[in-house]
Amino acid sequence: MIGWVGRIEHNKNWRVFLEMGYRMIDLNPHLYLWMFVDMDLSDPSEKESFESRVDQLGLRPRLIRYSNVPQRLMADYYSIIGDSGGFLCSTSLLEGFGYAVAEALLCRCPVLATDSDGVRSFIFHKKTGMFYKRDDMDDAVQKANDMMTIKSLRTTLRESGEMHIVKHFSVDAYVRNFISMLKNLGVHPQS
């Protein structure tokens, strides 16, 4: 399975995900695309374009949409995707903090992403995840295929991705950084 999380809007770049999925299904006919979306938040014209593109690519039989999944259940979905041999694809043109990417990595779900600001905190190419060149579908498909078929690479991404999040984004790390920030501001919290 290849997962995708976002809104059906230009910045989330859903068109690239559908095209990549179409090409990946050609390489692996047993592949499914899982999209976690809230179609109610989509602009009607964008939603219409999305539905039209799904039909043009013939993806309906291989596309499963999950709408409004409670956040507490997403870890289970990311784990299933990672255990299936798949990955999370983040196609955003610009991304803030990248919560979905961080959570997927923590759940041992490899991530293939555009190099879009916020995800640089989590993804170090071929160590904790992989970047593909934006607007280069051949590069995206090649890296997606490598991620799914090169066992040693996949193992590295799953293990290193999880350990990076545990080490740098744990509650303890957050508390240490917050206390350090307070001290830099001249506030000395009591232990």
Image (tube, rainbow, N blue to C red):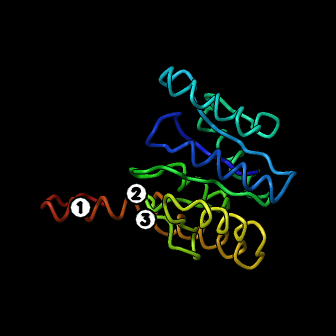
Measuring 53% from the left and 51% from the top, which residue is drawn there? 91
Viewer-side label of 1, 2: 2
**Residue where numbered disc 2 is placed:** 118
**Residue where numbered disc 3 is placed:** 120
Q: Are marks 1 and 2 in contact (CB under 8 Å)?
A: no
Q: Which secondary structure lies at badge 1?
A: helix
| Residue 117 position within the rendered picture, expressed as x and y whole percent measured from the top left | 38, 59
Viewer-side label of 3, 1: 3
Three-letter code for the amino acid on which mark 1 is drawn? Met
Could you tell which of marks 1 and 2 lies nearer the N-terminus? 2
In which quadrant of the rendered view does residue 191 lie? bottom left
Q: Which secondary structure lies at badge 2?
A: helix
| Residue 51 position within the rendered picture, expressed as x and y whole percent measured from the top left | 64, 28
Q: For the residues marked 3 and 1, what is the alpha-carbon distance in whole angstroms?
A: 22 Å
Which one is in front, 187 or 89? 89
Could you tell which of marks 3 and 1 lies nearer the N-terminus? 3
Q: For the residues marked 2 and 3, what is the alpha-carbon distance in whole angstroms?
A: 5 Å
Q: For the residues marked 1 and 2, what is the alpha-carbon distance in whole angstroms?
A: 20 Å
183 to the left or right of 124: left
Image height of 179 relative to 72, above or below:
below
